[in-house]
Amino acid sequence: QVQLVESGGGLVQAGGSLRLSCSASGRTFSSRTMGWFRQAPGKERELVAAIRWNGIITDYPDSVKGRFTISRDNAKNTVYLQMNSLKPEDTAVYYCAVVRRLLPVEYDYWGQGTQVTVSS
């Protein structure tokens, strides 16, 4: 069993920054691809970033490219999402997950989510 706990969400003005953290339990964290997803009301869940065990990052979708950066610290069992130049359309619940594969995306575990709200 793997437990994921997200933190770092909150209220921020457009143009501001937030850093989300996801702390993971489990003995195989360092060998797994980790991802960040988001879901806004009325929209389907969207993959925004993924990072492999060795730090290789998948391509970001156009909606966040150049603004979001995923990273991980395997020694701390933690994955991060640095979000800069935030826009109101970034408002969503953000989830981290242990990713099984990306095309199509499948995941084995996910956290409870953290709310990000960006005001104009």
Image: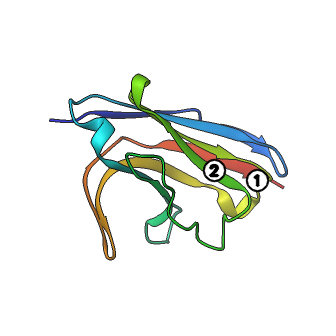
In this figure, which residue is indicated by the disc labeled 2?
69
Q: Position of residue 84 (x, y in %)?
A: 76, 49
In which quarter of the view is residue 88 placed?
bottom right
10 Å crowding of disc 1: few (<14), some (14-19), many (20+): many
Query: In the image, is 36 to the left or to the right of 8?
Result: left
Residue 26: image x %, image y %? 22, 30
Dividing the picture into quadrants, the one containing residue 120 is bottom right
Answer with left or right where residue 41 lies relative to residue 104.
right
Q: Position of residue 79 (x, y in %)?
A: 47, 38
Q: Residue at x 49, y 71 (%)?
A: 42
The answer to whether 57 appears left or right of 33 in the picture is right
* Residue at the farthest left position: 1
Residue plotted at (69% across, 39% down) = 18
Q: Secondary structure at mark 2?
A: strand
Residue of label 1: 86
In the rendered image, the residue lying farthest to the top is 76
Q: Amino acid at mark 2?
A: Thr
| Picture quadrant where residue 6 is located | top left
The three-letter amino acid code for the residue at tag 1 is Leu
State the image coordinates of residue 25 (x, y, percent, origin top left): 28, 28
Q: Is residue 74 visible?
A: yes
